[in-house]
């Protein structure tokens, strides 16, 4: 139980830190670069904590005894690792504070694309581990009685609605297509391009190196926007998972 709680605290901390990366000036560019390096270490720590599961699934990945959900979770975590490595390397290449390299435009494109992928993959990761989080939520809010179900539905609708709104108004979907848009620079082709109004660039027309005021409202709005996008994909994952389980059970009944 203690290990599960440690895992939960680490996951929540990583989610909050990752959400704040999507507007690089919300906590200054220095935070974006330095904390970006630190989050990689946290992800490695996450892997170390779950090393037994990783080793076990790796050895038995093609074994029929391993559930499909487990295999999907393994693939998602592997893709997250690949994305984090690419973000780390490209982040160093395009760094303006910690490092100073003349990076090719392709490094920026990969950095933005993999950042968007991490947002989606983290959502899928959360959805696949929903039973784990659900147990803690039931325990913590047991004092609400049956009302917790109604409150939970209301919160879910609000989160999904705001997550869809945030996804539509962010540059996430455009970042995913950047590497496939020949001749498109990260700061071109969209009114919300990185380096402009929203997103990883979030320069808002400010000159490079200009001080950006840090406000509580900007931090909260950034957290809400990108956490709800993650939770949107988490919800979709849970619904798809339940639909597959339902269809498989119906098929099994027919066969019997």
Image (tube, rainbow, N blue to C red):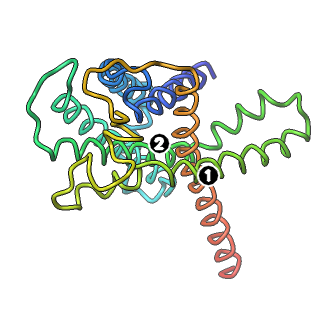
Q: Is residue 224 left or right of residue 158?
A: left
Determine the residue located farthest toward the right in the rendered image: 146
> Which x, y percent locates residue 63?
40, 56
At 90% across and 40% down in the image, what residue appears? 147
Residue 152 occupies quadrant: top right
Q: Mark 1 points at which residue?
A: 235
Residue 96 occupies quadrant: top left
Crowding at dot 2, Cα within 10 Å, few <14 / some 14-19 / many 20+, comes out as: many
> Which x, y percent locates residue 159?
66, 45
Q: In which quarter of the image is the C terminus?
A: bottom right
Q: Quadrant of the N terminus?
A: top right
Mark 1 or mark 2: whose residue is earlier in sequence: 2
Q: Name the residue under label 2.
A: 122
- Is 242 in front, or is 177? 177
Per the model, the C-alpha gap separating discs 1 and 2 is 12 Å
> Which x, y percent locates residue 189?
29, 56
């Amino acid at each position: 139980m203690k290990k599960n709680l440690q895992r939960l605290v680490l996951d929540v901390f990583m989610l909050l830190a990752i959400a704040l990366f999507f507007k690089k000036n919300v906590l200054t560019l220095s935070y974006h670069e330095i904390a970006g390096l630190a989050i990689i270490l946290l992800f490695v720590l996450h892997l170390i904590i779950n090393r037994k599961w990783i080793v076990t699934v790796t050895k038995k990945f093609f074994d029929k005894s391993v559930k499909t959900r487990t295999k999907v979770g393994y693939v998602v975590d592997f893709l997250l690792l690949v994305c984090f490595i690419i973000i780390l390397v490209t982040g160093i290449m395009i760094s303006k504070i910690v490092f100073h390299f003349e990076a090719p435009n392709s490094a920026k494109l990969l950095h933005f694309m993999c950042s968007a992928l991490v947002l989606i993959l983290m959502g899928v990761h959360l959805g696949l581990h929903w039973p784990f989080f659900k147990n803690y939520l039931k325990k913590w809010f047991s004092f609400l009685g049956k009302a917790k179900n109604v409150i939970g539905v209301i919160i879910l609708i609000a989160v999904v609605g705001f997550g869809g709104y945030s996804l539509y108004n962010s540059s996430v979907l455009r970042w995913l297509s950047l590497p496939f848009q020949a001749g498109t620079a990260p700061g071109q082709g969209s009114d919300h391009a990185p380096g402009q109004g929203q997103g990883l660039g979030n320069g808002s027309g400010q000159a490079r190196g200009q001080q950006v005021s840090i406000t509580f409202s900007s931090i909260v709005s950034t957290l809400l926007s990108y956490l709800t996008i993650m939770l949107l994909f988490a919800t979709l994952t849970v619904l798809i998972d339940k639909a597959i389980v339902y269809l498989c059970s119906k098929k099994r009944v027919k066969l019997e």
